[in-house]
């Protein structure tokens, strides 16, 4: 019995641990930190940097010595016969003697060291490898900034769905009470059936909206999981509320934050792109320079007339060695090199234009982001006041309706106005959060 209890406890502990692994409790900052480490795009960016480092080393080693060893084995199934004038061997002039040169088997062992002495394209390649690594590192930095914004939006969408459900449930509770009271008043003959029917229509619409938002909430959670790099079915518990995030994201000092173009990641990426185009032009120019290579070789050759494969026993090996230098000078390419160089120069000119366009675009985006963020704060403050007013109007109309001094049409108008203001208000809160994230990216404010 005791053994069975231990097994049951172990199973329950395993199930509990597995359940906890599929649950996460996160604030917005924790969600951002988690996504920076685990999102799919960031993981790919990290691998790209590793690949760029390997490529940089691969390019660097082109200028290092390389050593190769080789084994060359030949076994003539039937040796070639050569005809030699017979008179060479004291025979009759005009006749030929059949001669076989070499042995049936040959084995050649060699080791060769090669060294690049000069190649203009090699030095350009080294610069290009460093530039490519810088591009990968900048791409990772850009990915992290985009991830921050994506997580903020996804987190905010979950909070909006949660807040909408809470509001809709509250509206349903009030409507059901109003409908119940109106139904009793109608049964006593003190109001028209139309007033009951109008409330039933409104209640039905709100319940339909609630069902829709509940479905959207499930999708919003899955989208947040996807943005963070999780399995989409991981259960998330969010500790921040829409209201607390909105208040913490209202920072008027950010509007006056200085814009540093040269430090902006998009501008640095454009500069790097321009540098890569310059290096491509230098590469084409370098192809007109001579190349110089050297090699040293050492080997031994063994021969055998034995019919057994690889039978070189008792055979003498003949050693040999070679030192060589190779110089290649390009002389004429039918203007192909010139065309490639001119095309590379055109691409460099295009990169200069794109760099200027990036400069102007980023400056404009920063101004627009400032304006949008300031407007979102103003809209939030206005929506908050309007919501308070709409709640008061709806409450007054509800009391008047129950007392019989207001029509169902007036009550419906007040309710629809309230429901519209509720949605406007929670959307204005999300806008404050999202527009601040967009402004931080436009100003290139680094991750905390």
Image (cartoon, rainbow, N blue to C red):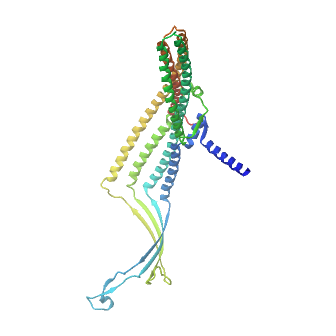
Residue 355: tell me if it is visible. yes
x then y, percent, for residue 43: 53, 45
Q: Which one is nearer the viewer's eye here, 91 or 223? A: 223
Q: Locate residue 360: give its quadrant.
A: top left
Residue 149: tell me if it is visible. no
Q: Residue furthest top?
A: 405
Q: Residue at x 55, y 9 (%)?
A: 403
**Number of marks in picture:** 0
Q: Residue at x 48, y 80 (%)?
A: 317
Q: Residue furthest right?
A: 2
Q: Which one is nearer the viewer's eye here, 167 or 377? A: 167
User: Height in image: 176 above or below 224?
Assistant: above
Q: Which one is nearer the viewer's eye here, 429 or 443? A: 429
Placement of the C terminus among the 4 image quadrants: top right
User: Height in image: 167 above or below 348?
Assistant: above
Q: Which one is nearer the viewer's eye here, 93 or 244? A: 244
Q: Residue furthest left?
A: 94
x then y, percent, for residue 56: 50, 52
Q: Locate residue 169: give its quadrant.
A: top right
x then y, percent, for residue 362: 46, 33
Q: Is residue 12 left or right of residue 115?
A: right
User: Height in image: 109 above or below 278?
Assistant: below
x then y, percent, for residue 356: 42, 36
């Amino acid at each position: 019995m005791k053994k069975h209890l231990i097994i049951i406890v172990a199973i329950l502990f395993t199930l509990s641990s597995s359940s906890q692994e599929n649950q996460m409790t996160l604030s917005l900052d924790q969600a951002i930190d988690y996504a920076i480490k685990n999102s799919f795009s960031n993981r790919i960016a990290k691998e790209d940097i590793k690949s760029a480092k390997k490529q940089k080393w691969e390019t660097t080693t082109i200028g290092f010595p390389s050593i190769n060893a080789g084994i060359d084995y030949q076994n003539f199934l039937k040796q070639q016969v050569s005809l030699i004038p017979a008179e060479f061997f004291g025979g009759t002039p005009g006749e030929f003697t059949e001669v076989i040169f070499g042995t049936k088997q040959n084995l050649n062992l060699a080791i060769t060291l090669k060294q690049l002495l000069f190649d203009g394209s090699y030095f350009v390649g080294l610069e290009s490898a460093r530039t490519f690594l810088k591009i990968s590192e900048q791409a990772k930095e850009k990915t992290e900034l985009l991830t921050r914004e994506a997580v903020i939006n996804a987190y905010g969408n979950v909070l909006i769905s949660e807040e909408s459900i809470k509001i809709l449930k509250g509206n349903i509770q009030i409507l059901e009470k109003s409908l119940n009271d109106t139904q009793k008043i109608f049964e006593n003959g003190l109001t028209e059936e139309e007033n009951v029917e109008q409330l039933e229509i409104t209640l039905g619409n709100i319940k339909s909206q609630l069902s829709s938002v509940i479905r959207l909430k499930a999708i919003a959670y899955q989208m947040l999981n996807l943005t963070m790099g999780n399995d989409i079915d991981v259960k998330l518990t969010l500790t921040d509320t829409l209201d607390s995030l909105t208040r913490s994201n209202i920072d008027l000092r950010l509007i006056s934050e200085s814009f540093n173009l040269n430090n902006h990641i998009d501008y640095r990426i454009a500069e790097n792109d321009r540098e890569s185009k310059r290096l491509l032009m230098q590469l084409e120019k370098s192809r007109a320079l001579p190349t110089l290579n050297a090699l040293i070789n050492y080997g031994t050759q063994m021969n055998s007339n034995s019919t057994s494969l690889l039978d070189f026993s008792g055979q003498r090996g003949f050693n040999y060695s070679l030192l060589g230098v190779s110089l290649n000078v390009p002389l004429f390419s039918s203007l192909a090199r010139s065309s490639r160089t001119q095309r590379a120069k055109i691409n460099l000119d295009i990169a200069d234009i794109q760099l200027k366009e990036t400069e102007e675009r980023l400056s404009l985006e920063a101004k627009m982001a400032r304006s949008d963020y300031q407007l979102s704060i103003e809209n939030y403050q206005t929506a908050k006041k309007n919501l308070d007013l709409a709640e008061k109007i709806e409450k007054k109309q509800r009391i008047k309706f129950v007392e019989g001094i207001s029509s169902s049409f007036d009550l419906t108008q007040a309710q629809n106005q309230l429901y519209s203001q509720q949605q406007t208000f929670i959307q204005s809160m999300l806008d404050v959060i999202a527009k601040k994230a967009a402004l931080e990216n436009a100003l290139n404010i680094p991750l905390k």
